[in-house]
Amino acid sequence: MSISQQITALRKGGDLGGAEKLAHDELKKNHSDRYLQNAYGWVIYFRLKEISDGLLDNKMTHMKAVSGLNHYVDEYFQLNLLSKPDLLHSLVLTQVLKIDKEWIRFVGFAKWWGVDNFREEDHEMLRLNNGKEIASLVLRYFYRIGHALTKHHADLSDTDQAWGENQLNEALNKHPDDQWLNYYKSKLLLLKGDSKGAQQALMLVIRRQKRAYWAWAHLGDILSIDNLEQSIICYQYAVSLAQKPGQIVNVREKLAKLLAIKERFEEAAAHLKRALTVREKEKLKIPDSLKQLLATNWYQQNADLKLSKELDVSSLVDDILYESANLVSRFGVLDNQNEHKKLAYISFGVNEGVVLRYKQFTGIENIKLGSVVSVEVEEGGSTAIRWSESEKSTIDGLLENFVGLMEKPDDREFGFLRVTGGPSIFVPPNLMKKIGNVSDENFRCKAILSMDKKKGKEGWVALKVEKI
């Protein structure tokens, strides 16, 4: 059995220590043996996997994990005869991505690993055992470049900065609608002083992730340069969206600073108190910036005030998000309230409409069936942005008033309003039940034009009926 086979046998037998020592000893004698390098490469992969598993199971400290990561990556760097692209090379990258998101060396590692060393299968989405899909290894590689580039920008050499930015741009050229690539592009542009470009790059992200606290927090950072009022609203909205208090302690501190500038000292103090409480409860470090704010006169004067309820700014954020967009108003009919799913459906026509969710479109749950509302959408788009009640009561060709004779077929729960010289209006069972057994009596109704899915024909359906 060759030495490389012995290393492999030790590894497969669970003796990683023995396999590692033997590989070390033999590579000192014959470093140019690619079989030895390959055998040791697999030992390094399983050492890295031990580290990522240890972190996941809380059996290893973060400091020890990073130390191990640095050591085994340096060892892997020495294996200059390994095949690339190759399964081993891709698996090593997979483990590095798992170990430490904040690893300061990642850009240098990614540059060495090689953007051209992906296998065909590395471009495919990864399906987990629970059925959930995650981004391909290729995209996760570029996401981490974006994260490291923006997180450690000041610590990187000019060469690594340029390389990282070029990779981010190349990835965006291939995936222009990818939200994470756009997010990191936005953060990079802000670091470079291009707030307008940063905001433009973020718009795709925030419109897709409208309830993501981190997106609104970043928009707050962008707007803090030249629009404090809007920045305050973004930070306030980010605070309201966060699921865990610890996620937004930094946002509260930024918000407090801006509120203090605007001399809104009571609000500013309340955010500082909440941030301090969370840091103390979760045993988080209290940064010097927070200590300085806590020492200010305005905080000391308001520190003992009772915490008031936080402001709801959800009705203001769309004005910021779509400030420069071309919005058009469309009149529609509220023809369904689904209280179970907490949504309303607004019809613009027989086969066109939008869903307004109660949580996003406050107050829509109180609008009565058959009411006309105005819905704002982006020009050329169909996604609802805002809504408002309308003074209109009808829409020609969609929502109209009719007068006719009521007719109820025998042994049927529904009925028809027969309009002289006009259409027959279908009256659903729920409305007929309120009317009772009537025949040949005059009624007026408000009806909406709908599609009869069984017959495949358009027809009028009563939303309201009343006897004349």
Image: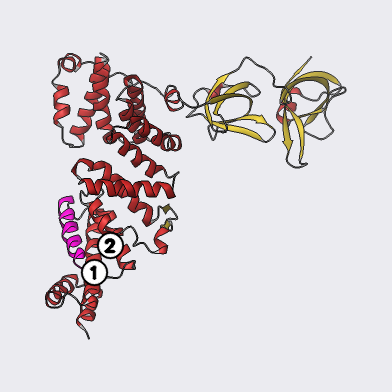
- Local crowd at mark 1 within 10 Å, few (<14), some, or many (≥20)? many
Q: Residue at x 40, y 33 (%)?
A: 200
Q: Which residues are magenta?
A: 62-79
Depth check: give the residue in front, 130 or 285.
285
Q: Which residue is mark 1?
A: 41
Mark 2 lies on a secondary structure that is helix
- How is the structure coloured here? secondary structure
Image coordinates of residue 38 in percent, x first then y, are 25, 73
Single out the residue that lies furthest toward the bottom: 1
Depth check: give the residue in front, 291 or 230.
230
The answer to whether 131 is drawn above or below residue 440 in the figure is: below
Image coordinates of residue 285 in percent, x first then y, are 16, 36
Depth check: give the residue in front, 85 or 395.
85
Among the two numbered marks 2 and 1 on one chain, the one whose residue lies closer to the N terminus: 1
Q: Quadrant of residue 310?
A: top left
The answer to whether 186 is drawn above or below residue 262 in the figure is: below
Q: Quadrant of residue 32?
A: bottom left
Callout count: 2
Q: Which residue is mark 2?
A: 92
Is residue 65 shown in magenta?
yes
Quarter of the image with the N terminus is: bottom left
Residue type at mark 2: give it: Val
Q: Is residue 292 left or right of residue 150?
A: left
Q: Residue at x 44, y 45 (%)?
A: 176
Q: Residue at x 36, y 22 (%)?
A: 230
